[in-house]
Image (spheres, grey):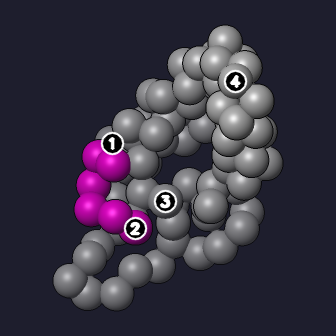
Amino acid sequence: NLLPRETVEFVSHCRKGDLEKAQDMNYRYFELMKGLFVEPNPVPVKQALKYAGRCESEVRLPLCEMSNKNQDRLKSLMKERNLIS
């Protein structure tokens, strides 16, 4: 999971009925979540975890690395949310 703490926090807000905070989190991470699906799963997630220093981005055939364009976009989305520097 790329955002384990944030996921727990989001679910907690939902369970408490604090939908305003949950909605704020949804807005904050929505574009990033979309960015994790620009190429076949799990390629973007592994790339994001690599940027976060949590695993390598290697995938087995028939999957291949993300395109440079999508890698740049994903890195930008993560930087905008202060997930990487």
Residue that numbered label 3 is attached to: 45
Which of 12/2 is in front?
12
Q: Report the disc number at residue 42.
A: 2
- Quadrant placement of the N terminus: bottom right
Question: Which element type, helix, strand or loop, lies under badge 2?
Answer: loop
Marks 3 and 2 sit apart, C-alpha to C-alpha, by: 5 Å
Q: Earlier in the sequence, mark 4 or mark 1?
A: 4
- The answer to if 8 sits in the magenta stretch is no
Marks 4 and 2 sit apart, C-alpha to C-alpha, by: 32 Å
Q: Earlier in the sequence, mark 4 or mark 2?
A: 4
Which residue occupies 51% across, 66% down? 46
The residue range painted magenta reads 37-42
Q: Nearer the viewer, mark 4 or mark 1?
A: 4
Question: Which element type, helix, strand or loop, lies under badge 4?
Answer: loop
Which residue occupies 49% across, 59% down? 45
Residue that numbered label 4 is attached to: 17
Where is residue 21 drawn, in percent x and y? 71, 18
Marks 1 and 3 sit apart, C-alpha to C-alpha, by: 15 Å
- Quadrant placement of the C terminus: top right
- The answer to if 41 sits in the magenta stretch is yes
Where is residue 76 drawn, in percent x and y? 54, 32
Is there a contact, CB below 8 Å, between mark 3 and mark 2?
yes
Residue that numbered label 1 is attached to: 69
